[in-house]
C-alpha cells in the first residue's frame, strides 16, 4: 500500500535526514553552494488530488538535470523519435554526466543518451523556435502546463552563475558541432544561454511531484483529464529515467529502489511510480555521483516499506 499520512512521511524524512552529514552541496556552481546541506523535504502527489508532504516543501528548487527529461518530452513531441535519435543515443553510460570520454572513443560521435550533458545539449538545441527567448518560452509554457502553475519561472542569478562557469558544456558543444551532431549554424553562446535558463527553472516539491504524476500516468494529467504528453513519449522518458536518470548510479538505483526517477545537482529528485503517484524531493547534500544523498535514502525507505519497485 502507498504511504497514507503526512506523519508516516515525517518519520521517513527524520530517518533519512541523518545521511545529509555525509553529502556536500554543489558548490562548483556558486549559487547552488548557498543551499543548506541538512534540508530535506518530500511531496507525493496522487491521481485523486491528494498530496502528502513532509519537510519544508515550499522551498524552491532549480530543476538542473531534471529539466532534461522535460525538454526531451517536448522535443520528442516536436520532432518525433526518429529525428531525435539520429542525434542522440539510447544507451546508459558508466561515466560521469559531464564526461567527454565516450564522444571521443565512439563512432559515430553521438551522445549515448539524452540525460548526460552532451545529449541534453543536443536535445535543447532541437527545441523549435527562432530565438533563445521563443524557445525558452515554449519550454517554460510546457512546464507551467505540467504543473498547472503559470507563475513558475527561472532564477536569474542561478542561470547567470551557471552561464559564467559552463566551460565544459561549451567544450562539449564545440566538439558536437565539429562532428555534425549539432547544426552547423548553432551559436554556442546562445545555446548556453538557453540551456542555463532551462536548468535554472525553479519550483517547489509539490510542483515537482505534480510533473512526476503526469509521467506516472502515461502523460495524462489526472486532475484535468488532459493528455499533456503522448503515451509513447511518456514511456520513452520513463525508460530513460530508469536506465540513465540517476547519473552513473542508475543501475544500483534500479536494483535498490526500482522506480523511474531523475535527479539534479540542486538536490532535487522527481519520481514517477507507474500508475500510482508522482514524487518530488529536495535534499541539496549530494553524494559523489551528484545525487541527493538523503533523497536516495528516503526513496529507498519508501520503496522498501511500500513495495514500489516495478521489477
Image (cartoon, grey):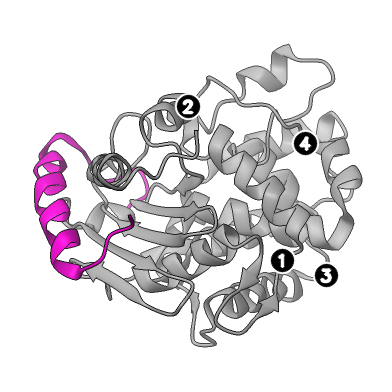
Please rate how many residues cluster around mark 4, counting C-alpha atoms within 10 Å: few if below 14, some from 14 to 19, many from 20: many
Instruction: Identify the image quadrant of residue 291.
Output: top left
Q: Which residue is mark 1?
A: 229
Q: Is residue 48 placed above or below 125 in the rendered structure?
A: below
Q: Which residue is mark 2?
A: 248
Q: Position of residue 38 (x, y in %)?
A: 13, 52
Which is more N-terminal, label 1 or label 4? 4
Q: Position of residue 34 (x, y in %)?
A: 23, 57
Tag 3's secondary structure? loop
In the rendered image, residue 85 lying in the magenta stretch gets the answer no
Which is more N-terminal, label 3 or label 2? 3
Between tags 1 and 3, which lies in front?
1
In three-dimensional space, the C-alpha distance between marks 2 and 3, rounded to whole angstroms, equals: 32 Å
Please rate how many residues cluster around mark 1, counting C-alpha atoms within 10 Å: few if below 14, some from 14 to 19, many from 20: many
In the rendered image, residue 8 lying in the magenta stretch gets the answer yes
Q: For residue 88, which numbered disc appears in the image?
A: 4
Looking at the image, can residue 31 be seen? no
Left or right: residue 255 compared with residue 117: left
Which is more N-terminal, label 1 or label 2? 1
Q: In the rendered structure, are the residues bearing label 4 and label 1 in contact, judged by CB atoms less than 8 Å apart?
A: no
Q: Position of residue 307 (x, y in %)?
A: 35, 43
Tag 4's secondary structure? loop
Which one is in front, 157 or 253? 253
Which is more N-terminal, label 3 or label 1? 3
Q: For residue 129, which numbered disc appears in the image?
A: 3
The magenta stretch is: 1-30
Between tags 4 and 1, which lies in front?
1
Which is more N-terminal, label 4 or label 2? 4
Residue occupying image coordinates x 59% and y 36%:
116
In three-dimensional space, the C-alpha distance between marks 1 and 3, rounded to whole angstroms, equals: 19 Å
Please rate how many residues cluster around mark 2, counting C-alpha atoms within 10 Å: few if below 14, some from 14 to 19, many from 20: many
Left or right: residue 190 compared with residue 30: right
Amino acid at each position: 500500500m502507498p504511504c497514507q499520512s503526512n506523519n508516516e512521511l515525517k518519520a521517513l524524512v527524520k530517518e533519512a535526514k541523518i545521511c545529509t552529514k555525509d553529502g556536500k552541496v554543489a558548490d562548483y556552481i556558486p549559487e547552488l553552494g548557498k543551499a543548506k546541506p541538512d534540508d530535506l523535504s518530500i511531496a507525493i502527489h496522487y491521481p485523486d488530488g491528494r498530496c502528502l508532504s513532509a519537510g519544508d516543501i515550499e522551498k524552491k528548487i532549480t530543476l538542473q538535470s531534471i529539466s532534461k527529461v522535460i525538454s526531451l518530452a517536448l522535443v520528442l513531441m516536436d520532432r518525433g523519435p526518429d529525428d531525435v535519435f539520429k542525434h542522440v543515443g539510447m544507451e546508459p553510460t558508466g561515466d560521469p554526466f559531464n564526461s567527454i570520454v565516450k564522444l571521443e572513443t565512439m563512432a559515430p560521435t553521438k551522445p549515448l543518451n539524452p540525460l548526460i550533458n552532451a545529449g541534453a545539449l543536443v536535445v535543447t538545441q532541437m527545441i523549435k523556435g527562432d530565438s533563445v527567448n521563443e524557445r525558452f518560452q515554449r519550454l517554460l509554457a510546457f512546464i507551467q502546463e505540467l504543473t498547472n502553475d503559470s507563475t513558475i519561472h527561472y532564477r536569474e542569478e542561478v542561470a547567470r552563475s551557471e552561464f559564467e562557469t559552463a566551460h565544459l558544456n561549451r567544450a562539449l558543444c564545440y566538439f558536437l558541432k565539429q562532428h555534425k551532431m549539432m547544426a552547423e549554424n548553432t551559436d554556442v553562446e546562445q545555446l548556453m544561454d538557453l540551456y542555463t535558463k532551462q536548468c535554472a527553472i525553479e519550483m517547489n516539491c509539490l510542483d515537482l511531484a505534480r510533473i512526476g504524476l503526469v509521467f506516472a500516468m502515461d502523460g495524462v494529467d489526472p486532475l484535468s483529464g488532459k493528455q499533456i504528453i503522448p503515451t509513447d513519449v511518456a514511456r520513452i522518458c520513463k525508460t530513460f529515467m530508469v536506465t540513465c536518470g540517476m547519473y552513473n548510479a542508475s543501475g544500483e538505483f534500479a536494483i535498490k529502489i526500482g522506480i523511474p526517477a531523475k535527479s539534479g545537482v540542486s538536490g532535487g529528485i522527481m519520481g514517477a511510480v507507474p500508475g500510482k503517484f508522482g514524487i518530488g524531493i529536495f535534499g541539496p547534500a549530494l553524494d559523489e555521483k551528484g545525487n541527493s544523498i538523503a533523497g536516495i535514502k528516503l526513496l529507498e525507505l519508501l520503496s522498501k516499506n511500500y513495495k514500489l519497485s516495478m521489477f
